[in-house]
Image (tube, rainbow, N blue to C red):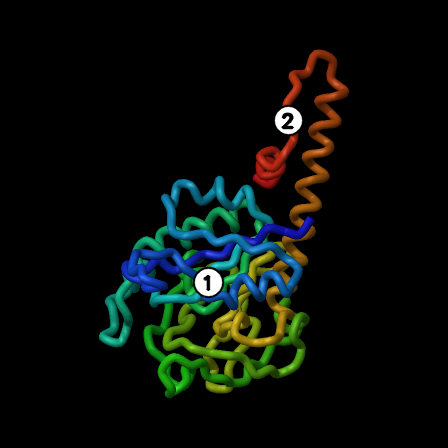
Amino acid sequence: MKPLIGISTYLEESTAWGVWELPAALLPAGYPRLVQRSGGTAVMLPPDDPDAAAAVVARLDGVVIAGGPDVEPARYGATADPRTGPPALERDAWELALIGAALASGTPLLGICRGMQLLNVALGGTLVQHVDGHSSPVVGSFGSHAVKPVPCTRYGELVPEEFAVPTHHHQTVDRLGTGLTVSAFAADGTVEAVELPDPRPVLGVQWHPEMGEDTRVMSWLVRAATVRAATARAASDRAASDRAATPGAASEPVGRRLDGAARQ
């Protein structure tokens, strides 16, 4: 069975398709397609009650926090720069809860662009609210620049060579969150990837792998999610076997809910 990868989504007040113009939870198709090309099954995670995040993550094998609007500066104790965009309050609250649940449960986690920034904020870090040169001058298109890996890091092992990536952002990591390590830089010194050390399966990248052909970053997440799922199934099978071996034990279906409970 392919691992189930949840991807956070945008939430837009007005989106048009066909004859309709309605509020919509949506996601650029590059995200699920990259998950699928990397061997996973993608599901969308639109903003919800943050209190539901732990239960949602318990049913997943991996989590992707997608790109999108600027993180609200108040989340990291800053005043908004005039160049900072309007906040996405529901996304901030929901995605911070997803990150917290993934970190608490050991569920593999990948942050992309805004997702990397939010991971840093979740761990107590701060952001630079504006940098130049990391977006295309053409509106609606992505730029490209080289990213240099840091040796002996997870990202450095995944992508050992300097590599050109699709990029579109104007904010980035400033003070690192607790426990994070920088694992890639741009030529101008901008932080391009962060991670938590092994065995914690957590990686953030500042660029947009879903807009390119390289699958190495997402394939890492899917592999980690596959291991996670196999471990949970083994624990579920052991629990079922123990119950069956206990005289008078109550019968209980073994399924995805028990699988999720084993991950807590």
**Rendered image: mark on residue 6:** none
- Residue 243 lies, in percent from the top left, at 71, 22
Q: Nearer the viewer, residue 197 or 39?
A: 39
Against 199, is 264 above or below?
above
Q: Secondary structure at mark 1?
A: loop
Disc 1 crowd, CA 10 A, few/some/many (<14, 14-19, 20+)? many
Q: Residue furthest right?
A: 245
Cα distance between the residues tagged 2 and 1: 35 Å
Q: Quadrant of the C terminus?
A: top right
Q: Quadrant of residue 222?
A: bottom right
Against 190, is 97 above or below?
above
**Number of the front mark, 2 or 1:** 2
- Residue 53 lies, in percent from the top left, at 44, 44
Against 222, is 236 above or below?
above
Q: Are marks 2 and 1 in contact (CB under 8 Å)?
A: no
Residue at numbered disc 1: 66
Please indicate whether residue 65 sits to the left or right of residue 156 in the image.
left
> Mark 1 is on which residue type?
Ala
- Residue 28 lies, in percent from the top left, at 46, 66
> Mark 2 is on which residue type?
Pro
- Residue 245 lies, in percent from the top left, at 77, 20
Residue at 57%, 54% (x, y): give it.
5
Residue at 30%, 64% (x, y): give it.
73
Q: Residue furthest front?
A: 19
Q: Is residue 124 visible?
A: no
Residue at 68%, 16% (x, y): give it.
249
Q: Nearer the viewer, residue 1 or 231?
A: 1
Q: Quadrant of residue 169?
A: bottom left
Residue at numbered disc 2: 253
Q: Secondary structure at mark 2?
A: loop
Q: Residue furthest top?
A: 248
